[in-house]
Image (tube, helix red, strand yellow):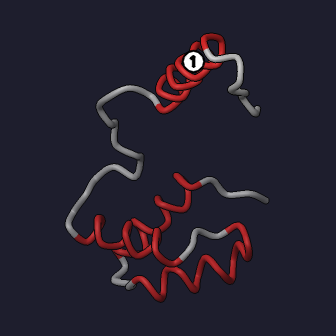
């Protein structure tokens, strides 16, 4: 059975409330989920956030454009340059 990242974060939050540290949380995930468990670094980061009394276990919204918008713009610029200069090519 697969457990989502948000579900793992909820489990981390409960573990922090029980007084567990990063190593204990990570080892529990490793035992229960094997290769599907979060890596140590993200577990440690979330433990720290919950120890600082963070409430939500979801990612925060980020300002700015989405990554796909930037890559689409870059691709359009490159395609325009390749149209203008016939010796250039675009590898997909």
- Which residue shows up at 75% across the image and 33% down it? 91
Among the 4 quarters of the image, the one containing residue 52:
bottom left
- Which residue shows up at 52% across the image and 52% down it? 6
Give the image location of residue 36, x and y in percent. Answer: 71, 67
- Which residue shows up at 71% across the image and 28% down it? 90
Q: In this view, does 28 lie to the left or right of 34?
A: left
Give the image location of residue 8, x and y in percent. Answer: 54, 62
Which residue is labeled 1 in the image?
81
- Looking at the rendered image, the quarter that the N terminus falls into is bottom right
Task: Depth check: give the residue in front, 54 or 63.
Answer: 63
- Looking at the rendered image, the quarter that the C terminus falls into is top right
Q: In the displayed orientation, state which residue is furthest to the left.
A: 52
Q: In this view, does 46 lie to the left or right of 7?
A: left
Q: Is mark 1 on a helix, strand or loop?
A: helix
Give the image location of residue 38, x and y in percent. Answer: 58, 68
Task: Depth check: give the residue in front, 76 or 8.
Answer: 76
Residue 67 versus residue 23 in the image, above or below: above
Q: In this view, does 23 lie to the left or right of 49?
A: right
Give the image location of residue 81, x and y in percent. Answer: 57, 18
């Amino acid at each position: 059975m697969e457990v989502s990242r948000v579900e793992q974060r909820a489990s981390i939050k409960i573990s922090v409330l029980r007084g567990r540290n990063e190593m204990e949380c990570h080892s529990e995930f490793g035992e229960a989920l094997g290769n599907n468990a979060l890596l140590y670094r993200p577990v440690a980061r979330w433990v720290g956030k919950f120890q600082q009394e963070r409430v939500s276990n979801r990612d925060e919204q980020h300002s700015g454009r989405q990554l796909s918008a930037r890559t689409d713009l870059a691709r359009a610029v490159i395609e325009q340059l390749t149209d203008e200069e016939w010796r250039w090519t675009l590898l997909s």
